Image (cartoon, rainbow, N blue to C red):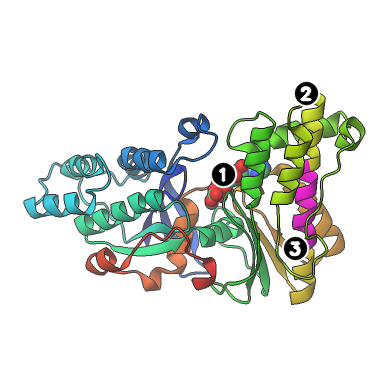
Amino acid sequence: MIILSIETSCDETAVSIVEALGDFPTATYEIRGNALFSQIETHREFGGVFPSLAKREHALTLVPMLEEALRQANLDNRDHHDPFPEDISHIHELLFREPGLADNLLSFSDTHNTPAIDLIAVTAGPGLEPALWVGVNFAKALSHLWNTAVVSVNHMEGHVFASVFNGHSLAHVEFPALSLLISGAHTELILMKQWKQYEKIGQTRDDAVGEAFDKVARMLGLPYPGGPEIEKLAAQAREKKLHSKDLLGLELPRPMLTSPDYDFSFSGIKTAVRYAVEGKQLTEDERCAIAREFQDAVTQVLIGKTQRAVDAYGIQSLIIGGGVSASAHLGEMFTDFFNYHYPDLRLYIPEKGLTTDNSIMIALAGHAHADSALDAQQANTLIRADGNRSIADE
Ligand code: KG4
Ligand code: ZN
């Protein structure tokens, strides 16, 4: 089965072509094409992702990404053929809210034969709704042009699959498993008794971890996205043995660390940083020390709450996913802690390149749900972008 996958939930425009041999969950996968454009430079000057700008960029970039992915996969047959006139009007109807996309797609289809794609997988949520709709409508248009089935994919479920994917196949996960999903908009603990069964047992009550990283970075005068910037400063602080307690008398709180639940709260840590930096001219050393203390506070809370759930549910496998799992420090802390205290627990952290948003993970999740794919007509009426879609509903 050859899967074409589309991801536009936030500020990455990504299209992949993944060939699956065999059935989920024992299939092997070959990444035949993978094209990703990050809009980070566009959003940086706004200090965060600007939804209407993201939407416009996705509309401009999707066809080039599609062409690149097909070229890599050797599926870009370029025999000239004219699209049918009725296709043109329907494609314009489907894409009328996405400036330029219909024209781009029609000139693409004018010069390319229908590729041998068996399934289109598209992120339908959660994420920024205007951004999601571009991908969803594009998937519907392709489905109509190529007469190919579509499966709508949950972005957070994609992060789960990214974590257990070793580049060729999915890990042999032992259940019950626990997924800690940490990204720019989500922080949740998900209990999995089986593949594709998700029960949300805890989540943040205010900011997501990635969001807190981004906001604290901004307070320290660092660009968006803040996670990697904080990581650099914190690493310098560790090297120079700088502590915010020594330099500024600052110890950040570890909110809800001991509360008898699986929820998180990060806004208090963020506010404590704000009070500490407001109106001050910080030295470089002080900024590094604050970044370190912030990273430590967040990591300790995440480990503490995860451990509580691991104990309570007899967890066999711990799956960490989402953009914040790109943090090397966080990965080391989790690995050291759980390898030492829980030597039998299997720990999964995504490989580099699959931590932040990508479309390979959408192809994997799409393959797992291939049995619920819809034909072009059904997809047109039934698939909707949903910014708040929950993994617990999959
Ligand atoms: O999963 P993702 O790419 O997009 C969403 O679905 O939200 O996650 C993006 C988030 C951003 O908030 C970014 O600052 C954070 O992941 N992030 C990090 C690191 N790299 C990315 N946070 C902490 N440390 C990092 N090294
Ligand atoms: Zn994500």
User: Which image quadrant is residue 78 in?
Assistant: top left
For residue 134, side relative to residue 320 (left or right):
left
Can you say which quadrant of the picture contains the N terminus?
bottom left
Q: Is residue 326 visible?
A: no
Q: How many angstroms separate mark 3 from mark 2 (CA)?
A: 33 Å
Amino acid under disc 1:
Gly
Residue 237: x and y in percent read 82, 32
Relative to residue 118, is residue 219 depicted above or below?
above
For residue 277, side relative to residue 118 (left or right):
right
Residue 86: x and y in percent read 9, 54
Q: Are marks 3 and 2 in contact (CB under 8 Å)?
A: no
For residue 344, side relative to residue 22 (left or right):
right
Front-most of residues 122 and 346: 122
Q: How many angstroms separate mark 3 from mark 1 (CA)?
A: 24 Å
Q: Which residues are magenta?
A: 294-306
Residue 256: x and y in percent read 78, 60
Q: Is residue 351 visible?
A: yes
Front-most of residues 327 and 393: 393
Please tell me the numbered disc located at residue 306. 3
The verdict on label 2 being within 8 Å of ligand 1 is no
Front-most of residues 319 and 236: 236
Relative to residue 306, is residue 90 depicted above or below?
above
- Judged by depth in the image, the label closer to the viewer, 3 or 1, is 3
- Judged by depth in the image, the label closer to the viewer, 2 or 1, is 2
User: Which image quadrant is residue 251 in?
Assistant: top right
Please tell me the numbered disc located at residue 353. 1
Residue 180: x and y in percent read 66, 60
Residue 152 is a magenta residue:
no
Q: Residue at x 26, y 51 (%)?
A: 115
Q: How many angstroms separate mark 2 from mark 1 (CA)?
A: 30 Å
